Each structure stands twice: as structure tokens, then as C-alpha cells.
Amino acid sequence: MAILCFIPTCAQDDSKSLQSKIESLRAQENFQVTDTVHINLLNQLGKNYRFYKTDSLLTISKQALKYSQNAEYVKGQSESYLGLGDYYSGKGERVAAINNYTKALVLSKNIEASALTLRIINNLASEYAFKGDFAKSLSNYLKGIELAEEKGELEMLSIMNENIAGLYASQKDYDQAQIFYDAVKKLNEKLGDEVNSAQTMSNLASLYADMGKLDYAMFNVNRSISIFEDNQVMDWLAYAYEIKGKVYLKQNKYQWALYWYHQGELLHENLDDDRGKIDLFNGIAEAYLGQKKDSLAQKYAMEAYEISNRINFVEGTQKCAKTLYKISKNRKEFRKALAFHEIYQEVSDTLHRKENKKSLTMLKTREEYNRQKQELIEANQIALAKQRGLIYAGIIVLIIFAIITFFIKRAEKIQKRLNTELKAKKEKLEAHEAALTDSNETKTKLFSIIGHDLRGPIGALQGLLQMFTDGEMNKSEFFEFIPKLKSDVDHIYFTLNNLLSWGNSQMNGSTTKASVFSLESIVDENINLLSELSKSKSIKIVSELSGNTLIWSDSNQIDIVVRNLISNALKFTPENGMITIKAQEKNDNWEIAVRDTGVGMDKVTVENLFKKNNNITTYGTNNEKGTGLGLSLCKEMVEKNGGTIWVESALRKGSTFFFTLPKAEDKYSQAS
């Protein structure tokens, strides 16, 4: 998704004209460099060089700033700082860019130059987006939108709404992104600028490609390419070629993808736009990877990765690290693959941190509330207008006072009803917001618990490795800890699986895809998976399931349930114990039981075990640590598949976990 900035089209042709004007002005008698016309031409020329000659942009902006300061020309100083901010932004020097944009903003506000202020706010917000701080980016865009609406600046209003759409697209909230694009398209219709519309179509094509709507993506990108070619807008044409390559890449048409990517690469030879090269080179790398040309793929991916790091573009680093992980894994360079995967995870956590999501979610809630409020106000106004029309008609035909009173009373009644509806809508939205806040608090609390449980084993592993690295223990002493390390890593892996399953269910609204499968095979797989743990405690696991235990459910979700229940039983069963898995037909369901000879639970624990927000965390018979997440996950997965789960237990006698699942009907069995 390209961030929109206020840049003139046909910048190269305009630059020649501006250079000619500057030379003509300098040739005049009594010319002075502090002439405001001269300073304005310099700043305009620097702006045109942004994506073509960035070094010239730096030189010209410094000159213009010096002349403006000598002339005490505030507007010239503000535009010069804006040019410097644009230069440092292109070089990835975030702090320098933000500092210069901030200086420019203070000066423009002092002279109330609204058009210039809007350009600066937009570029400052874009810089925070490049930095990965979407919360601050969004805050600045909203300030800019408020000013643009106040001053009637439709072009900047369109640009900032489109950039907010880009923030939502980067968080994969495509529905909300499309809402903002709809607003942008209406603004573009009022502006009547085909290049503006083509820029929006290019970004929409990228969005549709990410959504998998490839026909829509191709339609929009082809229209935008035609406009950019007609108007010679080379930087946007290069971006449109990259998007077209991306669409073909999504279709696995690698030869066509490479054709359009290379068209964009040719244009970039005459551009000075490092940020634009990142997605282009990364796309080329993915296309070559699809053709199994790993060496070429690695070359382009590394080049894109190095550019991303050089200009501190976190989204670029994220995408390139993911591509390099896939390439390294494909080449069996597992150390490199692991390193790039860790970088990808770290950057993803930065981009999807709580502050970003919370800011975007709150904006969505506010926009929804404002939209419904506006609809009710408009309905109110329409109703009142009808009543006024009736009253005026009554006055014109001299209807008696009683009839006029009747209409007034009726209008008041409608007003009261509409106000009641507005209040009800407001209360509903407030309740939704409260539920959202409660949900966020619950998730935050749960993640902190998981983080705590993972930090201990990882910290122990880190400490042990440090001691070995520092020579505080020899190799034989280190090998004595291998069983402990394996146990810790198994625990971390199991916990992360549960966490990822829960997170997918809670945050992405995972769907349940039922099919016919044999429960016996899933149980056998999990017994084999946990066999090492059962042997370490001399616990015997017995499956009494028959081969005809056919289930109509989501096999992946039921796999999670079975694994967690058997793991729980192992945790709370002492050495030389026994775990038994049985299944019994009950009308349309199978009733499955996982029975252990473990320590059991008291009545209070049993009653609270499956309650919402209950995080019971206890230690097993060998001090195994749990998170309290597994049983919540089991309950959710079973209920999503139309079943129920419960437990029967007695202290020192063991526990039996029961759950039901739908039987596969004859038609499903035959189909399978």
C-alpha cells in the first residue's frame, strides 16, 4: 500500500521549467537570493526532486532555509524544513525527519498557512506509519482531516482518508479499509482529477490482491496504468507495474509476474525511491522462488531486506524477512531460516502491538457511532421538514388553530420517538464499546499469564546456555541438563500451540470446518506424540476405541481437545498410573471419556473448572507447570462442534473428562 504525499505530477518536466525560471530570475539586475519569489521557486524545485534526485533536494532545501532565515521569511523556512523532512524520510532517518517536520509545522501554524500545514501533517503522519507507530500516525491524520474539513481542502482530505485506509489494510482489516476507500472515491469524484483517481485505483488494486479478489485487482490496476502512462507519472506507474506483478504472483503465474515486475524495475533506474524498490524486489524474489530459482530469489530478497534496514522501514523488513525465511528453509539453510523467522516475528509484534490495534479499533467504533448518529439526525430532519410543510400548508389554507395544534403535537411526538431511538442506539454502541474493552482486558490478562509461564523456562534455558558459553560448566555437565531442557522446550511448544489456537479463535473468528474422520486415528497419534512423557512417568495409556468411531466435526479442533485432555491426565497422574480412553454411542452422538488414576479434584475445583475467565493453574505430580488455557480451549472447541464437556472427579481416586461429538451419518460416511 503506497502512502500518498502531496507531490506534483510530471515532476521531471516541471523541474526543467522551474530551473529555467530560477536562472532567468538570477540574471536580472539587482537580484537578491533573499527574494521570496526566488525562495519559493527553490522550494518548489526541491519538492519535484523528491523521488528523482534526493541529494539535490537536500542541497536546495538547505539553501532555501538559509535564504529564508536571512530574509525572516517564515513560510519559506517552513517549506524548507518540510523539504529536509522529506529527504531524511527517504533515507530512513526517522528522528531527523520527524524533527524537521515538527519545526515546519510550528512555523506554518504561526502564519496560519492551512494548505502548507496540511501537507506537513500528512507527511508527519506518514513518517510515524513508516516507523510502525500507527497510533501516532492515526492521531496526526485525524487532526489533518479535521483541519481539511474546516478549510474545505478536498484533495488533502482525500489523501489523508486514503492513508488511514492503508493503516487498516496493513492490519488486515480489509472491511474497514474499504469503508475509507469509499469515502475517498466520493471525494475524488468531486475533485475530477484523473491522476488522483488513478492513485486510489492502484492502492485499491493492492488491497483487492491481498483480499484474494484478483479480478477486481486487475481491473483497477489496468485502469490506473493507462492513466499514468498518458500523464507520464513515472513513480506511480512503477508502483502500478509492481501491483500488476503482485496480482499475477497471487495467481501463481510467475512468468507474467516477473514481466511486470521487471517493467517496474526498468522505471526505477530513473527514480530515486528506495522505499518503492522494497515491495518490487521482494515480489521478484517470491516469483523466482515460485519458479524454484532460489539463488535469484535470494539475491533480490536480500537487496530488498538491506534497503528496508538502511531506511528503517519496518513493514519492508517484515515482508522481506518472511520471504528470506522461506528461501532459506527451501535451501535447507535452517540456521538462517530460524534467524529470519525470529526477525519476522519481532517486527510483526511491533506492527501489531496493542496501541496500534486499540487506536484503530476505537476509531472504527467512533466512526460507526457517528454514522448511525448522522443517519438518525437526517431522518429527524426529514421528519421535521415534512411536519413543517404540513403546518405551512395549514397556515396557507387558513386551517383552524385546532388542526395546527394537532400537527404540532404530532411533530413533538415524532421528535420524542426519534430521540428515544437515538438514545437506544447510543446505549447499544456504548454497551458494545464496554464489551470490547472487557474483551481487550481479558485478552491482555491472559497473554500476561502465558508470557509469565513461558518466560521461566526460556529464562532457565538462556541462563544455562550463558553459563556454558562463559565456560562456567563443561560439556559433560551441560549434557546432564539435556532432559530438563527438552522438558522445558516441550512445555513451551505445547503452550504456544494452545495459545496460537486460542488467539486464532478469539481474534480472527476461526471457522469450524466439519468433515468425517476416525476418532481412533487422532487418539492413536496423540498417544504416540505423548509416549515419551508417559514412559518417563511409567504411565500406561490405553485406547479402547474401535475403528468405526466415525465423527462429524473439525478434525484439527478435536485433535487439540484430545491432546490437551491426555496431557492433563499425564500431568496429574503419579508414576505407574493408567489413562484410559473410551467411546460410547449415545443416539446421534459419541460420548468420549478420558479417565486417569491421578490425584483427582475436590468439589469446589470441579464446579469452577469450566467457568468463564477461570484461570486455574496448578502443578502436576512432577511439578509440571500449566497455564489454565488448555481446558478453556477444550470447552470452546467441543462446543463449536456441537458437543458438551464435563468432568467427574474424586480426590486421590482420579478424574474422568467426558465430551460428546456428533456421529457421522451414513451419507457422510459413504462420501468419505
Image (cartoon, grey):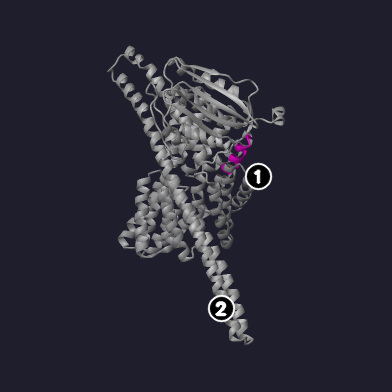
Which disc number belongs to residue 589?
A: none
| Disc 1 secondary structure class | helix
Residue 498 placement (x, y as % from top left): 48, 31
Q: What stretch is highlighted in magenta?
A: 241-253
Tell me if I can see residue 197 in this picture.
yes
When the figure is inspected, residue 619 is found, relative to residue 437, above or below; the finding is above
Indicate the amino acid at tag 1. Asp
Q: Do the residues labelled 1 and 2 touch (CB within 8 Å)?
A: no
Q: Does the magenta stretch include residue 199?
A: no
The 10 Å Cα crowd at callout 2, few under 14, some 14 to 19, many 20 or more, is: some
Task: Left or right? Give the position of 555 relative to 325.
Answer: right
For label 1, the residue is 215
The 10 Å Cα crowd at callout 1, few under 14, some 14 to 19, many 20 or more, is: few
Seen at 31% across and 24% down, the residue is: 463
Along the polypeptide, which appears first: circle 1 or circle 2?
A: 1
Quadrant where the C terminus lies? top right
For label 2, the residue is 408
Task: Left or right? Give the position of 111 relative to 554.
Answer: left
Distance CA(mark 1)–CA(mark 2):
55 Å
Give residue 143's quadrant in the image.
Answer: bottom left
